[in-house]
Image (cartoon, rainbow, N blue to C red):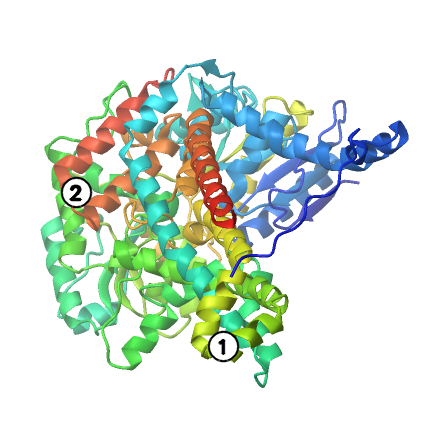
Amino acid sequence: MGAVSLSGCAGLTRRVSSTSSGSTDRVTMQVYGTDVETKVYARLAEQFSSERGVTVDLTVVPFADFATGVDAGLLSGTAPDVFRVDYPTMGLYASTDQLLDVTDPLEELAGDVRPSLLRAVTYGKRLYGVPQHVDTSALVYRPDVLRDAGVGAVPDRPEDAWSWEEFGDVASKVRDASPEDGSAFAVNWQAAGAFRWLTWLFMAGGHLYDEKLEKAVLDDDAGVRALEFTRSFFDNEWVPRSTSTKSPTYPDAQFTAGRLGMLFAGNFLVPAFADTIGDRFEYAVTYQPRDERRASELGGNAIVATRDSGNPELAAELLVYLGSSDAMKQFCEASVLLPTRESLAAQDLDFAVGGDLMGVYADQVSTIEDRDVADVTTPTFAEVNVDLANELESCFLGDSSPQDTLGAIADKVDAAALLNDGAAP
Amino acid sequence: MTAPTVAPAEVSPQGAAMTGSPGQARAAWGMLAPNLLLIGVFLAGPLAWAFAMAFQDKRSFGKGTWSGLDNLSRLFGDDVFWRALLNTAIFTAATVPVGVLLGLGLALLMNKALPGRGVFRTIVYLPIVVSSLVTSLVGLLLFDESVGIINGILRDLGLADVSWQSDGALAMTSVVVMTLWSRIGFSMVIYIAALQDVDPQVIEAAEVDGARAWQVTRRVVVPLLRPTTFFLVLVNLIWSFQVFDVVYVMTNGGPGYSTTMLVTYAYDEGFGPARNFGYGATVGVVLFVIIGALTLLQLRRNARAEA
């Protein structure tokens, strides 16, 4: 009989792996996530344990600490057999040969996942993980606030998404109608979310890297336009100044507290909104604005196995199980996340809450193009993400001009790009 | 008035006071060994390793390669490093003197027979007992620009919000305030202990000579506390140069680089997404050299003052 053990938030002091060489009936797994997500992981681990007659040691750690713990584990040979990782960080592990090549075991999955999403877990044409889900942002808004501000119709079809100019007009109206401690909207680019600024770059028709991923190209007209527009969020006082890219807090608390009319928010927040907003006020979701094109960011997480796992066969089996249609469906429905399997994306999933909002998010995901994914999954993107946060804030809140800011980002991207050998398709 | 002096220990011509039997030496080494082992494994070893990494191009995975002075060269041309150094110096200049002086003032106050003295001492000392992470989170709760308690009170009073997080100077102020809050209790307790050792006869003599309360404090008590002040300045100096958690939690180094400190920068470079161990170690080594130099400077100043 299989068993699953769960250690909550073990942090960095606990050895997260109990992998022992030659053990064929035990696999260790480390995840992070919301309460709902970790409960589903525990359930899936239990199901796998029961079906296979093995033990899954499940450890839950905070997202902020997962990479430090995994790094230490990989260097000391105590890493978990299987762990959850975000797409921007995964490139580092794949490029440094830390992950188990699961191209063959995941052949069936690979045939059912959109190529652009499959690219997020591919390095040098080999597959290194299960793209378990994808999430992205859309514009959550309060119909009552927009109505009171005199905003007429809100786009309910992708083709009607507001242009940047139209969105600016809406933001000005909402700002003018807001109470003194309120703002028109906020963008979710704090903490490790600075890469969400790239959505505006993509909308303007720009990109971070050239097609070979060797050189930064964001300091072109599209980059300047994107940065000038996003900087105007602060200059026009559409957003609170405390919601810049290095803010230590997320803006969703301000939305749930009723201080914002609109919020660019990920679909993973839908359960939290249902809990914290309840019936206090009405909220809905619409498409992100558009410029030269529509765009959205690639969020989400993969499940990977370590190359030096003490039990690679069982680790690979667990990955196959978690990537199966049934497991992915359970995970996404309960956690309100979007599946990467095309066969599931085509179905009407029974999301635990906020199912009526998910259509917009699913549509936003469809705007993600191959080159957008390539930009945010290079081996060095995680450090580029930090540079983005630092430099963008200097422009949003400081004196740095858009041209100087883009130049500084480009210099850092170019320096880091030297380490991206092998990332190009 | 001169500081009390201690007569040197008498040493026999053969230096017998400095040596013992082989058995005593073995016992001494036996008792020292656990500490020496811990110091070697957790302090000297990592320190030597950090020095070695500072001269390598070393990322988290894969072997490092010797890169000579490349990291140092990059450091000297790195605007963020100089900004972090300046911020750390400003932070140190703001926290050390104020923290020590406030601690002295509170100690002088609490040293008197005030009603509820024990309760006040406990309240002031409490932040030291609590984890610094917790005090930092309290700081975030207080100074959050949008939903923080301080701006909430200001709004209730009909005043404008203060940009605690989006204005560089104010962000630094908030970090300094929380640091002082968590530190003055320590200075106070050490000063109170030192005040217990001040000879009442000396104070009485000064009073008999006509000195007023302020003059007694300024001319007699404070000079007698010089060794304690030296200790507190040194410890606070080192703590200020090592500041990390309060910045990490409250401002994340921002806005921009306004509150980025040397340690947060070293952490970001070494353990952040860049995982650039070599460069992170270089920042750490430079910090070590700066703290070492300042400590030596203080030791020499103190030795001159004592002489």
In the picture of the structure, the residue carrying the numbered disc 1 is: B209
Residue B220 % position (x, y): 50, 67
The image quarter containing residue B170 is bottom left
Residue B16 % position (x, y): 81, 32
**Which label belongs to residue A400?**
2
Residue A83 lies, with reference to residue A151, above or below; the image says above
Query: Is there CB contact under 8 Å for labels 2 and 1?
Result: no
Query: Residue type at mark 2?
Result: Ser
Q: Nearer the viewer, residue A244 or B255?
A: B255
Secondary structure under tag 1 reads loop
Residue B191 lies, with reference to residue A358, above or below; the image says below
Query: Residue type at mark 1?
Result: Asp
Number of numbered tags placed on the structure image: 2
The chain to which mark 2 is attached is A
Q: CA distance from mark 2 to mark 1?
A: 64 Å
Q: Nearer the viewer, residue B191 or B176?
A: B191
For this view, does A376 lie left or right of residue A306?
A: left
Q: What residue appears at the point 88 percent right and 30 percent down from the top-left corner?
A: B21
Residue A187 lies, with reference to residue B51, above or below; the image says below
Q: What residue appears at the point 61 percent right and 73 percent down from the top-left corner?
A: B200
Q: Nearer the viewer, residue A155 or A277?
A: A277
Q: What residue appears at the point 64 percent right and 25 percent down from the top-left corner?
A: A309
